[in-house]
Amino acid sequence: MLNAKIKGVIKTIEKDEAIIDLGEREIAWPKENLKQGLKAGDPVVLALFTEEEDTKNTEELAKALLNEVLRKE
């Protein structure tokens, strides 16, 4: 599955948003959607998926976790 990924660095975290430096440009990311514990200077990877791809990825992860749990019993 091909997906689009962009590497960046969190430049600052302000009141409502984080500014992410992508090299040639910066984007504002809603602070509420940041992974807890991220801070200015942390490297990040932004990935773009279709809704269908996201659902499939979530289902595959859930199946893998369930299989791992069942194998341990």
Image (spheres, rainbow, N blue to C red):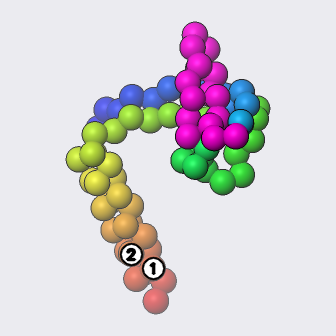
Q: Is residue 26 above or below residue 19?
A: above
Q: Kindly identify which numbered label has been placed on residue 69.
A: 1
Magenta: predominant secondary structure element?
strand
* Residue 20 or residue 2, whichever sits in front: 20
Q: Does the magenta stretch include residue 28?
A: yes
Q: Kindly identify which numbered label has been placed on residue 66.
A: 2
Q: Which residue is located at x 71 percent, y 36 percent?
A: 14
Q: Kindly identify which numbered label has been placed on residue 33.
A: none
Q: In this view, does 68 lie to the left or right of 24?
A: left
Q: In this view, does 6 lie above or below 64?
A: above
Are the two marked residues, 1 and 2, in contact with CB atoms closer than 8 angstroms?
yes
Identify the element where label 1 is drawn: helix
Residue lying at the far left in this picture: please name it. 52
Residue lying at the far top in this picture: please name it. 24
Magenta-highlighted residues: 15-30
The three-letter amino acid code for the residue at tag 1 is: Val
Quarter residue 15 falls in: top right
Q: Which residue is located at x 40 percent, y 82 percent?
A: 70
